[in-house]
Amino acid sequence: GVKKGGTRALLEFLRAHPAVRALGAEPHFFDRGYEKGLRWYRNLMPRTLEGQITMEKTPSYFVTKEAPKRIYNMSRDTKLIVVVRNPVTRAISDYTQTLSKNPAIPSFQALAFKNVSTGLVDTTWSAVRIGIYAKHLDNWLQYFSLSKFLFVSGERLVSDPAGEMGRVQDFLGLKRVVTDKHFYFNETKGFPCLKKPEGSSRPRCLGKSKGRPHPKIHGQVIQRLQEFYRPFNMKFYQMTGQDFGWD
């Protein structure tokens, strides 16, 4: 999926399924640690029984040029789930995360535009570049057919987690075990939470960093970014056969 798109939520929700074993941390094997070798990667994985599915999530794979080829070389049968979210909100969320770690960075507007008066968007800034989904997907489609992908809406993962998780389980060939009985909505966070996660009787909400308040960003800045992303979004809808309703 993409950074700040909802990948952690998806992983935690899917882990509630008894047929899924997931690695909790992001291994970053196919982007940053590839020279450590496949054996190193395999050893990170949780033990699984026959018929269980192993998964990991590292959002940066989606935007890493070498990742598709490397994953294809490991196994061309890998199923790929990509969680995406409105690229403008995603960029703001990305910026918010960086700001929380480094309060001295320039304003969102200063980073998003090469030239504010002309409204020229700076595509070298990673927060902007990540959201050009059509471009990244193009890179993956050189190796994997569309049938190997499921595109999950980060927005629907929040508004209708059970519905979106139904699609995920179908795609993975699993029984629909994770249903609306698993979720309740946490009003203060504005996020769905799991009633009973794997191996625990206590409800489980996503970490403190999820649902952080975003800084106030001028309406014109948002509008300009929406215009910038629109053609890329339209191309992405065409490529995936799915309208995510961001426009």
Image (cartoon, helix red, strand yellow):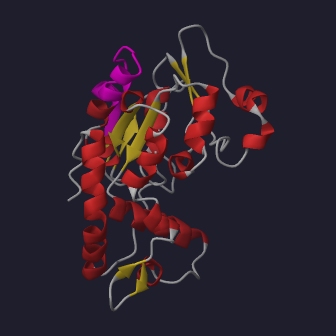
Q: Nearer the viewer, residue 182 or 119?
A: 119
Q: Nearer the viewer, residue 196 or 231?
A: 231
Q: Residue 5, percent across and down? A: 42, 51
Left of 227 or right of it: where is 90? right
Left of 241 or right of it: where is 217? right
The answer to which image quadrant residue 175 occupies is: top left
Is 156 above or below relative to 116?
A: above
Is 191 above or below relative to 18?
A: below
The answer to which image quadrant residue 54 occupies is: top right
Q: Nearer the viewer, residue 76 or 102?
A: 76
Is 57 above or below relative to 46?
A: below
Q: Residue 64, percent across and down? A: 57, 51
Q: Nearer the viewer, residue 217 or 77?
A: 77
Q: Residue furthest front?
A: 142
The residue sitting at 49% across, 16% down in the picture is 19
Image quarter hosting the C terminus: bottom left
Q: Residue furthest top?
A: 50
Q: Residue 237, percent across and down? A: 25, 47
Q: Is 146 within the magenta? A: no
The residue sitting at 41% across, 65% down in the picture is 91
Labels in figure, total: 0
The residue sitting at 42% across, 40% down in the picture is 82
User: Which range of residues does the magenta coloring cover?
Assistant: 165-184
Q: Residue furthest bottom?
A: 117
Left of 99 or right of it: where is 193? left
Does residue 195 appear in the picture of this structure? no
Q: Residue 134, percent across and down? A: 37, 52
Does residue 122 appear in the picture of this structure? yes
